[in-house]
Image: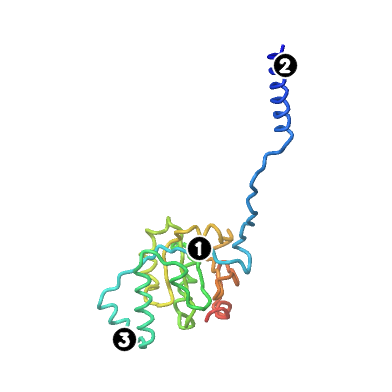
């Protein structure tokens, strides 16, 4: 009899514990809500920038000819630019110069991109402090050589060209028309984004 009572008591205790477990919600650790950044909105921070640099090899003869009409300051800037561009990757830290930064998303086979590049190269003298990053998608790597050679972009110290290696394009692309030019302030916040053909008198207001 005593054994039966003990068994019934144990069953009752177990049933009560099970009932409490069902009614008491399990404690969960809530993760803090992190809002998704809208990189396409004005004022948004610039996403991670990592450019696989296309460094066009310039012969000693070409370099000497190019330096004839360059000032001492321009030769110094070109030497610094070539040192950065010869790295495999260029990051935002390499381009940190307390001035507006221009990021041009382009396709080497795009006629509008060619026209915009030609216009920028002709007006490169406006770029005293601002830098211009010309960024193509990774699939365009084989097409960069002819593009760089045709427009001589490697001859100008403010210009860095290569392919996107951090999904920068995927975060900022507006899916409208190429080229797309994003302008970032010195603290790397989005000031303005242009798509398609953009005249120089519009861009020059942002160039430093």
Q: Is 45 on the left-hand or right-hand side of 90?
A: right
Determine the CA span between mark 2 and mark 1.
Answer: 70 Å
Q: Which residue is mark 2?
A: 5
Residue 54, position as x, y percentages in the image: 37, 65
Mark toward the start of the polypeptide (3 vs 2): 2
Q: Which residue is mark 1?
A: 48
The circle on residue 180 is: none
**Label 2 Cα neighbours within 10 Å, binned few <14 / some 14-19 / many ≥20:** few
> Tag 3's secondary structure?
loop
Mark toward the start of the polypeptide (1 vs 3): 1
> Tag 1's secondary structure?
loop
User: Eyeballing the image, is 165 above or below 204?
Assistant: above
Looking at the rendering, in which quadrant would you find the N terminus? top right
Kindly indicate the quadrant of the structure image that contains residue 150: bottom left
User: Of circles 3 and 2, which is in front?
Assistant: 2
User: Eyeballing the image, is 190 above or below 207?
Assistant: above
> Tag 2's secondary structure?
helix
Color style of the picture: rainbow
User: Of circles 2 and 1, which is in front?
Assistant: 2
Determine the CA span between mark 1 and mark 3.
Answer: 37 Å
Residue 193, position as x, y percentages in the image: 59, 68
Q: Residue at x 37, y 76 (%)?
A: 155
Q: Which residue is mark 3?
A: 68
Residue 136, position as x, y percentages in the image: 45, 62
């Amino acid at each position: 009899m005593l054994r039966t009572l003990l068994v019934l008591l144990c069953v009752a205790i177990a049933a009560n514990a099970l009932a409490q477990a069902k009614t008491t919600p399990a404690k969960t650790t809530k993760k803090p809500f992190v809002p998704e950044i809208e990189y396409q909105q004005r004022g948004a921070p610039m996403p991670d920038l990592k450019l696989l640099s296309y460094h066009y090899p310039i012969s000693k003869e070409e370099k000497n000819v190019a330096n004839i009409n360059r000032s001492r300051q321009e030769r110094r800037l070109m030497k610094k630019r070539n040192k950065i561009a010869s790295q495999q990757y260029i990051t935002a830290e390499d381009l940190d110069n307390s001035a507006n930064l221009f990021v041009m998303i382009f396709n080497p086979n795009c006629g509008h991109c060619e026209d915009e590049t030609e216009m920028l190269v002709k007006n490169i003298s406006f770029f005293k402090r601002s830098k211009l990053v010309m960024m193509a998608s990774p699939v365009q790597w084989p097409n960069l050589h002819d593009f760089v050679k045709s427009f001589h972009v490697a001859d100008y110290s403010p210009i860095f060209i290569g392919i996107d290696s951090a999904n920068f394009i995927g975060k900022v692309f507006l899916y409208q028309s190429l080229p797309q030019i994003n302008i970032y302030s010195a603290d790397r916040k989005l000031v303005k984004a242009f798509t398609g053909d953009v005249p120089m008198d519009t861009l020059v207001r942002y160039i430093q």
